[in-house]
Amino acid sequence: MSTNQRIDLVAPCGIDCGTCELYLCKDNGKLLEYLLSKGIPRDKLPCAGCRTNQGNCPVIGSPCATYACVVGKEVEFCFQCNEFPCPKLNPSADRAGVLPHNMKVFNLCTIQRKGVEGFVEISTEIKGRYYKGTMEIGKGPRIVE
């Protein structure tokens, strides 16, 4: 995959579609079968990513309001908007253990600081800290080996 193709997999909200199971199932038959068993329609898999799908993520069932907002404001990422961070990016405890929505602001700040290419290089590590890390007060999430 070219660098530009990989960069295009980073959604305007900061979610890295390139590390999403809905995208990764293209190369993993067991993952594909698992996602199908969870009710995700076969014609929606594998997902090509938010930008390619113009904000039509297979798991939300309707066009993404955040994607529409970014397109309407003619910016590439939410952090480029003068209203950043807005309520669409507000973290929520609801399903935080299984959905990456709480990662958005951190991801966007990382993209702003390191650029999208720099973010892509470490996005798997960021996702690993989120899902597999344990919080150490004053130190942040640590992955326990």
Image (cartoon, grey):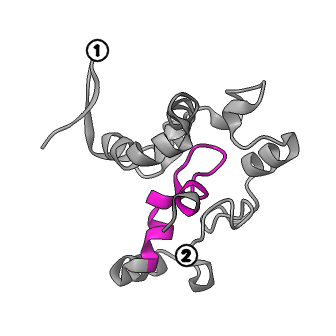
> Going by the picture, which residue comes out furthest to the right?
72
Residue 88, percent from left and from top: 69, 37
Q: In the rendered image, which residue does mark 2 sit on?
A: 40
Q: Answer left or right for 103 relative to 41.
A: left
Instruction: Say which residue appears at 67% left-offset and 27% top-offset.
Output: 85
Tell me where residue 128 appears, x and y as whole percent. 32, 46
Give the residue number, with chain letter if any, for mark 1: 138
Amino acid carrying label 2: it is Ile
Could you tell me which secondary element the residue under label 1 belongs to? loop
Image quarter of the C terminus: top left
Residue 95 visible in image: no
Please provide percent x and percent y for residue 53.
70, 67
Picture quadrant of residue 62: bottom right
Tell me the amino acid under the disc marked 1: Gly
* Residue 108: x %, y % from top left: 57, 35
* Dot placed on the residue nearer the N-terminal end, 1 or 2: 2
The total of numbered circles placed on residues is: 2
- Verify whether residue 80 appears in magenta: no
Residue at 27% in and 45% down: 132
Mark toward the viewer: 1 or 2: 1
Identify the residue shown where x is 37% and y is 84%: 29
Q: Secondary structure at mark 2?
A: loop
Q: Which residues are magenta?
A: 5-26
Q: Nearer the viewer, residue 57 or 16?
A: 16
Residue at point 78%, 24% (across, down): 82
Q: Does the magenta segment cover residue 19?
A: yes
Q: CA distance from mark 1 to mark 2?
A: 39 Å
Residue lying furthest top: 138
